[in-house]
Amino acid sequence: MRYNIYLEPYIYFRFDKKRALLVNFLNDEFLLSGDNHLFDIIQKIVSSPNNMFVIDKKQINDYIPILQVLRKNNMGNYCQYEQSSMQFISEINIVEGKEAQKKVSLYSRLNQGLYFSEMTLICNQEKKNCSGYLKYMYGNDNDASIICNKYCVNDYDEKKILSYIKDATKYNNLKRIRIVGLNVDGVLGLVNSSVVKEFCHKGKLHFCFNYSWILENDNLEIENLISDSNFEFDIIVDKNIEELKDWQVYNKKHHFLYPIDNSKQLLSYNSYIEKYPNYDITPYLVLNPVNMESLHKYILFSADDLLNQKHKYRIIRTNNCLNSTYWGRIIIFGGEYVSYGSNKVEKLNNYSLEEHIKESFSNLSSDWFAIRNYDSCKRCIFQYLCPSPSPIEDYLRKYTKFKCLLFDKNRD
């Protein structure tokens, strides 16, 4: 008598030289094991053209212990060979990386606009604000300075800015347009436009400034705009965070971005939030050659953090194809250059923005498809449970010996 050992079709699995990881997509349960017989089962199923692992009666007793574990977790079982001649396994185990991305592009080629969710227009009237925002986007001083000096140099063209805002109305999924780098005259010139007023009314258009720049200008017209309920602002708090508590002109609608580039600022932020919990403040790390060693630990996590996530099917399926850090983001510099979230900037040339999006989406050149594909990650069983790559991680890998976001004993 022969037996067919199988895994259920809703089971995701990966394995390396030491362990195997199985995830039940129906209930989020997982099995992380170094059992040799489990390795054998997975390897034989993967190598079989029919996804089968057939053994005889003499061998079945060796596999009973691990089969009991699989059966208990609703992950697999065995039956008489004649009863099951073929076994289906999850498509995600067959189609990974570029092959999966090609399918995403194929299915979505005609409706890329559904995924376009955030546009940032970088102007050059006030470089300080541009630099502050780019530090927020890229998480490091180096890239922000290089990109700001190289691309935030074009003449400000109000008609072109308004044209991009108007074009953005085509994209139903667009949640936010940020305008960064305007001076006082630039802001006051734009807010009187009917196109801008329409987006402001919908709560979709945000002006982004450095906190110190607003204080230095001491302009009542800007402060009146900030307190006006029709406008929303993203304000980078580049001064002592304690100074926020006395500036009541900011209402709860406005969103604050607080850069952290040393441990002291992190402590200040935590202390401030305890005292004033009503402010909408997002902290973010900003790395530089001096603070990399002290701050990089704040982006690490454990394997348990990954394995205890909910909705693993959605996480793995998404991370297998797309970069959720960049997904839907577009940054336009001076109307001529575009970035899809990372520090890679491209010239639009003769393309319209819409055509450029379609082209980069179709040929997978957009950073929206920049998945976790570092050499060390390709061999890791947690590859698609880890969050998508980010500019901070790229920066650490480039300038330090940093190789992995995992820090505990479950790391291979």
Image (tube, grey):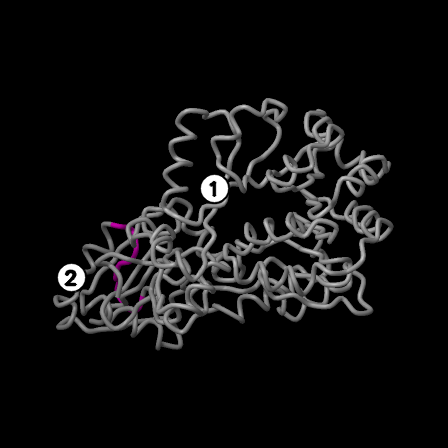
x and y percentages locating residue 206 in the rendered image: 68, 39
Is 182 or 91 nearer to us in this picture? Answer: 182
Using the image, determine if residue 256 lies above or below residue 224: below
Which quadrant: the C terminus? bottom left
Q: Residues within 10 Å of mark 1 (few under 14, many from 20)?
A: some
The stretch of residues the image draws in magenta is 73-82
Using the image, determine if residue 110 lies above or below residue 247: below
Using the image, determine if residue 41 lies above or below residue 261: below
Going by the image, does 404 lie left or right of 54? Answer: right
Does the magenta-highlighted stretch encompass residue 76?
yes
Q: Viewer-nearest of labels 2 and 1?
A: 1
Q: Residue at x 71, y 61 (%)?
A: 357
x and y percentages locating residue 250 in the rendered image: 61, 26
Q: Amino acid at mark 1?
A: Pro
Q: Amino acid at mark 2?
A: Ile
Q: Residues within 10 Å of mark 2 (few under 14, many from 20)?
A: some
Q: Which residue is mark 1?
A: 283
Q: Quadrant of residue 334?
A: bottom right
Q: Which mark is residue 38?
A: none
Is 155 or 91 nearer to us in this picture? Answer: 155
Q: CA distance from mark 2 to mark 1?
A: 51 Å
x and y percentages locating residue 127 in the rendered image: 67, 52
Q: Helix or strand or loop: what does disc 2 sit on?
A: helix
x and y percentages locating residue 283 in the rendered image: 47, 42
Is 313 or 335 nearer to us in this picture? Answer: 335
Q: Residue at x 68, y 25 (%)?
A: 227
Q: Quadrant of residue 233?
A: top right
Q: Which residue is mark 2?
A: 64
Q: Residue at x 77, y 48 (%)?
A: 168
Using the image, determine if residue 32 lies above or below residue 219: below
Which quadrant: the N terminus? bottom left
Mark 2 / mark 1, whichever is N-terminal: 2
